[in-house]
């Protein structure tokens, strides 16, 4: 019965199985991540940022979209080592938009330098 009810439930389009987590302690381990996020359902993969640009962030991929929603609802603002987690749904289009914007800015800067234009 519960499964039938869930099947008819419509989720907003931004909700998906991939969560983007920010404000993590830099020293957090994969095991600790599984302990925190695994309470909400089966996890397919966790990727913890390990470069200077991605430290303190992670992607958590759930097997089930409803588990991801439950984790996002409950873990946003969760305190880990005196840091409050920011848990968002990963949106590929926003990530690519930012990459494209950075490329456009770089291209503009090069063009300005080439023609001696400063704003």
Image (cartoon, rainbow, N blue to C red):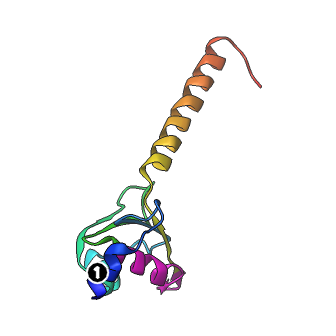
Residue 13 visible somewhere in the drawing: yes
Is 73 magenta? The answer is yes
Is 100 magenta? The answer is no
Q: Quadrant of the C terminus?
A: top right
Q: Residue at x 41, y 75 (%)?
A: 69
- Viewed as shown, does residue 7 lie left or right of 10? left
Figure check: 51 above or below 41: above
Residue extending furthest top? 115
Residue 38 visible somewhere in the drawing: no
* Residue picked out by circle 1: 4
Q: Residue at x 55, y 24 (%)?
A: 107
Residue 46 lies, in percent from the top left, at 28, 68
Quadrant hosting residue 39? bottom left
Instruction: Using the image as rendered, state which of residue 28 and residue 105 is in the foreground.
Output: 105
Number of numbered callouts drawn: 1
Looking at the rendering, the stretch of residues picked out in magenta corresponds to: 66-83
Figure check: 119 above or below 80: above
Residue 92 lies, in percent from the top left, at 42, 50
Residue 22 lies, in percent from the top left, at 48, 68
Q: Quadrant of the N terminus?
A: bottom left
Q: Residue at x 45, y 76 (%)?
A: 72
Check disc 1 and report its element: helix, strand or loop.
helix
Quadrant hosting residue 106? top right
């Amino acid at each position: 019965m519960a499964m039938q009810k869930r099947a008819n439930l419509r989720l907003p389009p931004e909700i998906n199985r991939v969560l983007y987590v920010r404000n993590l302690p830099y020293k957090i381990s994969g095991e600790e991540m599984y302990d925190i996020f695994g309470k909400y359902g089966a996890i397919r993969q966790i990727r913890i940022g390990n470069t200077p640009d991605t430290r303190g962030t992670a992607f958590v991929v759930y097997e089930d979209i409803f588990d991801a929603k439950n984790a996002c609802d409950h873990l946003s603002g969760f305190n880990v080592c005196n840091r409050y987690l920011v848990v968002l749904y990963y949106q590929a289009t926003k990530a690519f938009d930012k990459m494209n914007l950075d490329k456009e800015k770089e291209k503009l800067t090069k063009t300005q330098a080439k023609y001696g234009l400063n704003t």
